[in-house]
Image: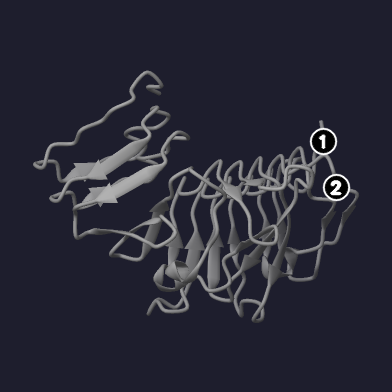
Amino acid sequence: KCKSVKFIIIPEGIINIGEQAFFDCSCTSFKIPKNLTYLGDGALEMSTLTTIQSESPAFIITENGFLVNTNGELLTAPDNEAIYFGGEIDTCWSINKYALAHSTFQSDFQIDLSILGNGSPRATVSVGSYAFYGVRCSERELHELTVVLPTKIANIGDHAFAESEVKSLSFLDGKPQNPVKLGTRAFSRCTSIESINFLDIFDEIPSSCFEYCTGVTSITIPSTIKNIGTTSNAVVSNY
């Protein structure tokens, strides 16, 4: 962590920046140099970052300000306003690790990922670990968000939506044909969840998946579930 760092100038000779390299710095802007080819997950995870520029052909800044690499991975977004997903995620197949952690979302109180990967040749799409960790709703009095998942979703990583204001999962165009892999603590401390009734896309509930979801009053475990994690916190623990 380097909160005292407010300016970072990357020389043109740098070609790789590792995971969380500038985590929690206090920069308001960042320019990617023209020779950079790799930017690690969470490298630009800064709550103060409002502007990202790229001189490298390996990275694209979309109309809504998202930083995407040419491999189709969404890496991050500036934290200057409530986030709204548009057509730019159509060609992305992955929301990478830490990509949108602690972001604020608008657009009818949804995190709409329904078109994620529609224009990608890949058969499946993925939400990385910590990708939406701690996300919030722009309407502060509501404190609840619905995540609209794409039919091609195959993996939701560890802590993907933990400590967020996510309340439920839904689909627009049908559910996945194959079970979705769910990471540990994927919804841990999501206190807006009241009813866990969206488990029919999974075949396993990993350990601590819903621990400290203190708002939960009912749980529906469908026949698709074959395994529940070995710890007492696998489904819900409020203690």
Percent position (x, y) of residue 65?
A: 41, 55
**Three-letter code for the amino acid on which mark 1 is drawn:** Asn
Percent position (x, y) of residue 213?
A: 78, 42
Q: Is residue 211 above or below residue 62?
A: above
- The residue that appears at 76% across and 64% down in the rendered structure is 198
Cα separation between marks 2 and 1: 9 Å
Q: Nearer the viewer, residue 230 or 4?
A: 4
Q: Nearer the viewer, residue 42 or 66?
A: 66
Is label 2 in contact with label 1 (beta carbons under 8 Å)? yes
Q: Secondary structure at mark 2?
A: loop
For residue 100, the mark is none
Q: Is residue 109 above or below residue 17?
A: below
Tell me which numbered mark, 2 or 1, is placed earlier along the sequence.
Answer: 2
For residue 238, the mark is 1
Percent position (x, y) of residue 74?
A: 41, 58
Residue under label 2: 216
- The residue that appears at 67% across and 65% down in the rendered structure is 202
Q: Secondary structure at mark 1?
A: loop
Percent position (x, y) of residue 207?
A: 67, 45
- Which residue sits furthest top? 4
